[in-house]
Image (spheres, helix red, strand yellow):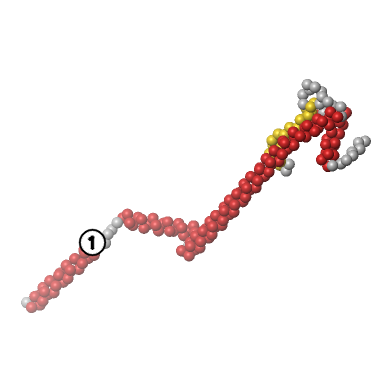
C-alpha cells in the first residue's frame, strides 16, 4: 500500500529528527556545569548585597554616596590626627625650652646663693650677730612661673644651734637685724647711697 509506505517513510524521518534533537540536547547539557557550591556562593553574595542595601541604601547609588561620605569622614579624622600630632610636637618643644630655661635659672640662683650668703653674714657681723650662721636652700619643685626652685632662708643666731627657717624665728630683735641686713644688701644692688630706718 502506497499510503502505508509513505507513512512509514515519514515515521522514519521523524524518528531520525528526534534522534538528532536528542543528541543536540545531550551535547548542550554536557556543556552546562551544574555546581551546588556555585549556587550557594551566589546565594550568599545575594544575601550580603541585600544586607548592605538594607543598612546603607536601597540602591547602588545610595550605597556609593554612603561610601563617599565615609571616606570624607576618614579624611577629616586623619587631618585632625595630623593637627593633634603637630600640636603635641609644639607642646613638647615649648616644654623642652621651659625646662632648659628653668635649669639655667636654677644654676644662676645656686651661684648667687654662695655670694649672697657671704654678704649677709658680713652684714650680720657688723650688726653684732658675729656667731650667726646663714644659709640659702634650694629644693626642686614642679616648674612654675618662678622656675623649678623653692627658695628658703635658714639661720641660726647662736653657736651650735641648728639652722632653722627664717620664717620661724621668734625673736623680734633678731628679725629686725636680719631684715636690716637684707635691706642693706638690696640698697647695694639698687645703688641707694643712704637708707634711713625708723
Q: Position of residue 86 (x, y in %)?
A: 59, 52
What residue is pinned by disc 1?
A: 30
Which of these two is toward me, 7 or 147?
Answer: 147
| Up/down of 101 relative to 76, above or below | above
Residue occupying image coordinates x 69% and y 38%: 107
For the question of whether residue 135 can be seen, the reply is yes
Which of these two is toward me, 92 or 132?
Answer: 132
Quarter of the image where the N terminus is located: bottom left
| Residue closest to the far right | 198
| Up/down of 119 relative to 48, above or below | above
Which of these two is toward me, 175 or 36?
Answer: 175
Q: Position of residue 42 (x, y in %)?
A: 36, 58
| Up/down of 2 relative to 142, above or below | below
Which quadrant of the structure image shows residue 183?
Answer: top right
Query: In the image, is 108 to the left or to the right of 70?
Result: right
| Residue closest to the far bottom | 2
Amino acid at each position: 500500500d502506497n499510503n502505508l509506505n509513505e507513512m512509514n517513510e515519514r515515521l522514519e524521518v521523524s524518528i531520525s529528527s528526534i534522534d538528532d534533537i536528542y543528541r543536540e540536547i545531550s551535547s548542550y547539557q554536557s556543556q552546562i556545569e551544574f555546581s551546588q557550591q556555585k549556587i550557594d556562593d551566589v546565594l550568599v553574595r545575594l544575601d550580603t548585597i541585600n544586607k548592605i542595601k538594607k543598612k546603607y541604601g536601597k540602591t547602588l547609588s545610595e550605597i556609593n554616596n554612603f561610601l563617599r561620605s565615609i571616606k570624607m569622614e576618614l579624611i577629616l579624622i586623619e587631618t585632625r590626627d595630623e593637627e593633634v600630632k603637630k600640636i603635641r610636637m609644639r607642646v613638647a618643644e615649648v616644654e623642652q625650652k621651659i625646662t632648659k630655661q628653668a635649669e639655667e635659672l636654677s644654676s644662676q640662683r645656686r651661684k648667687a646663693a654662695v655670694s649672697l650668703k657671704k654678704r649677709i653674714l658680713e652684714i650680720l657681723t657688723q650688726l653684732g650677730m658675729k656667731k650667726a650662721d646663714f644659709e640659702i636652700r634650694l629644693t626642686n619643685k614642679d616648674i612654675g612661673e618662678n622656675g623649678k626652685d623653692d627658695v628658703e632662708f635658714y639661720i641660726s643666731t647662736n653657736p651650735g644651734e641648728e639652722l632653722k627657717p627664717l620664717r620661724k624665728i621668734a625673736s623680734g630683735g633678731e628679725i629686725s637685724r636680719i631684715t636690716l641686713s637684707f635691706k642693706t644688701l638690696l640698697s647695694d644692688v639698687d645703688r641707694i647711697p643712704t637708707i634711713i630706718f625708723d
